[in-house]
Image (spheres, rainbow, N blue to C red):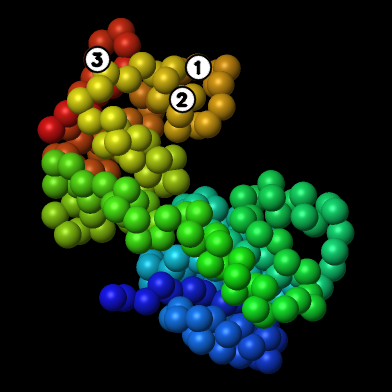
């Protein structure tokens, strides 16, 4: 069975080695990045990490900037490490979608336990995290869409929209329902924003775009 892969990002060599050793002992495969720029490059080139452990204070590109960049494309679990314990930092972290916030110094055993808990919550390896219909394969953990074994690059919202369509195959969905479920809140703007996203999504998935049918006067239906 393939090992779960974790990316550790910290500019301190000793900290990276400490985390690497404890995580490897727990059965994980670990990659290391020494700064934010390297982390971004590794994340987008590898595309199969299950979790990121990310230090806040780093040269070149800090942890907040890395987190923002990744959150534009992925919901991968992120644990932030910081030497400071300030409420505003924690609030910023959770606003950016951080899953856990750990202040240095910390127990490596406790960190490993939190990694295990987060991965369990995220359902790593669970069958429901792989969606497949009409030649479209969606890996919700790795945040990858493949069509006939070819990876298709989608924005965060396009990925969420396609996942929602596939999960509701054969069901007519109103624009309002799509907004409330994909955007995760009651949307008070123009519901036609859905049409714009669907148009872009259809274009990116090519001939598979025909599977997203327009229900005139209502919304859309994904039908194979």
x and y percent of residue 30 in the render?
A: 48, 81
Quarter of the rendering containing residue 56: bottom right
x and y percent of residue 176 in the render?
A: 44, 17
Disc 3: which residue: 215
User: In which quadrant of the rendered image does the N terminus lie?
Assistant: bottom left
Between the C-alphas of marks 1 and 3, the distance is 18 Å
Disc 2: which residue: 179
Between the C-alphas of marks 1 and 2, the distance is 10 Å
Q: Is there a contact, CB below 8 Å, between mark 1 and mark 3?
A: no
Disc 1, SS: loop
Q: Camera-side residue: 193 or 56?
A: 56
Instruction: Name which residue lies at 64% across and 88% down.
Output: 18
Q: Looking at the image, is mark 1 or mark 2 earlier in the sequence? A: 2
Instruction: Name which residue lies at 40% across and 40% down.
Output: 160
- Asked if residue 186 is positioned above or below residue 71 in the image, the reply reads above
Callout 3: few (<14), some (14-19), or many (20+) C-alpha neighbours within 10 Å?
few
User: In which quadrant of the rendered image does the C terminus lie?
Assistant: top left
- Asked if residue 206 is positioned above or below residue 6 in the image, the reply reads above
Q: Looking at the image, is mark 3 or mark 2 earlier in the sequence? A: 2
Disc 1: which residue: 190
Q: Looking at the image, is mark 1 or mark 3 earlier in the sequence? A: 1
Residue 121 visible? The answer is: yes
- Asked if residue 49 is positioned above or below residue 171 in the image, the reply reads below
Instruction: Name which residue lies at 49% across and 85% down.
Output: 24
Between the C-alphas of marks 3 and 2, the distance is 16 Å
């Amino acid at each position: 069975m393939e090992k779960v892969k974790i990316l550790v990002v910290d500019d301190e060599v000793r900290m990276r080695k400490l985390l690497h050793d404890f995580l490897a002992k727990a059965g994980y495969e670990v990659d290391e990045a020494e700064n934010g720029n390297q982390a971004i490059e590794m994340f987008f080139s590898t595309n199969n990490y299950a979790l990121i452990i990310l230090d806040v204070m780093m040269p070149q590109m800090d942890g907040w900037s890395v987190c923002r960049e990744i959150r534009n494309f992925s919901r991968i679990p992120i644990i932030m490490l910081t030497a400071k314990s300030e409420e505003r930092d924690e609030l910023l972290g959770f606003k950016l979608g951080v899953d856990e916030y750990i202040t240095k110094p910390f127990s490596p055993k406790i960190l490993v336990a939190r990694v295990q808990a987060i991965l369990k919550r995220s359902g790593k390896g669970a069958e429901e995290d792989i969606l497949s219909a009409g030649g479209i394969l969606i890996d919700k953990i790795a945040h990858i869409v493949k069509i006939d074994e070819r990876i298709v690059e989608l924005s965060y919202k396009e990925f969420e929209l396609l996942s929602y369509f596939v999960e509701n195959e054969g069901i007519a969905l109103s624009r309002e329902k799509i907004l409330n479920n994909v955007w995760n809140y009651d949307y008070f703007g123009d519901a036609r924003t859905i049409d714009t996203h669907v148009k872009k999504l259809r274009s990116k998935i090519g001939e598979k775009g025909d599977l997203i049918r327009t229900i005139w006067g209502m919304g859309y239906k994904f039908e194979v």
